Image (cartoon, helix red, strand yellow):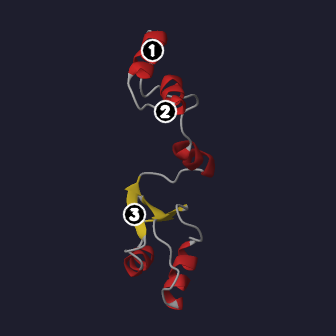
Amino acid sequence: MPGWFRITLHRSAIGLPERTHGVLKALGLRRRSQVVFHPVEPQFAGMIMKVKELVKVEEVDRPKTNWEVKQERTPEPGFYVERPAPKDQGKILQQLRRVGGVNQQEVDAEVRL
């Protein structure tokens, strides 16, 4: 059973010939990061070769629905702590104030991080 091409428009076609715009339109690509699926057939492979510098292509087993593609691009809910908060912010604040030439706003911003 033949697979599917997953084609993502990676670069814009602004400033390129109208012929290139026509190939992208025939593939169904209008916006950057847009994803379309086409069966693995010679006519689609030829169109992909015409715009190979603008697209990313993967061969997949089945086409995904629009909802599945959107879920791939959506980040997980919540947030990540990149740096843990200091255990004793009071001591750090006092140490920063003792250092000469430190701006109070910078100290407050550092403590909030």
Query: Image quadrant of residue 95?
Result: top left
Q: CA distance from mark 3 to mark 1?
A: 56 Å
Report x, y in % for residue 57. Answer: 39, 63
Q: CA distance from mark 3 to mark 2?
A: 52 Å
User: What residue sits 56% from the left and 70% below the top?
Assistant: 29
Residue, disc 1: 94
Q: Is residue 76 above or below residue 61?
A: above
Q: Which mark is residue 78?
A: none
Instruction: Identify the amino acid type marked 2.
Output: Asn
- Upstream in sequence: badge 3 or badge 1: 3
Few, some or many residues within 10 Å of mark 2 (<14, 14–19, 20+): few
Q: CA distance from mark 1 to mark 2?
A: 13 Å
Instruction: Identify the amino acid type marked 1.
Output: Gln
Q: Secondary structure at mark 2?
A: loop
Q: Is residue 113 visible?
A: no
User: What residue sits 40% from the left and 81% below the top?
Assistant: 50
Q: Which mark is residue 57?
A: 3
Few, some or many residues within 10 Å of mark 3 (<14, 14–19, 20+): some
Q: Is residue 83 visible?
A: yes
Residue, disc 2: 103
Question: For this rendering, which residue is in front, 104 or 48?
Answer: 104
Q: Is residue 45 above or below residue 71?
A: below
User: What residue sits 39% from the left and 27% below the top?
Assistant: 100
Instruction: Identify the amino acid type marked 3.
Output: Val
Few, some or many residues within 10 Å of mark 1 (<14, 14–19, 20+): few
Q: Residue furthest front?
A: 100
Report if the CB atoms under discs 1 and 2 are less than 8 Å apart: no
Q: Secondary structure at mark 1?
A: helix
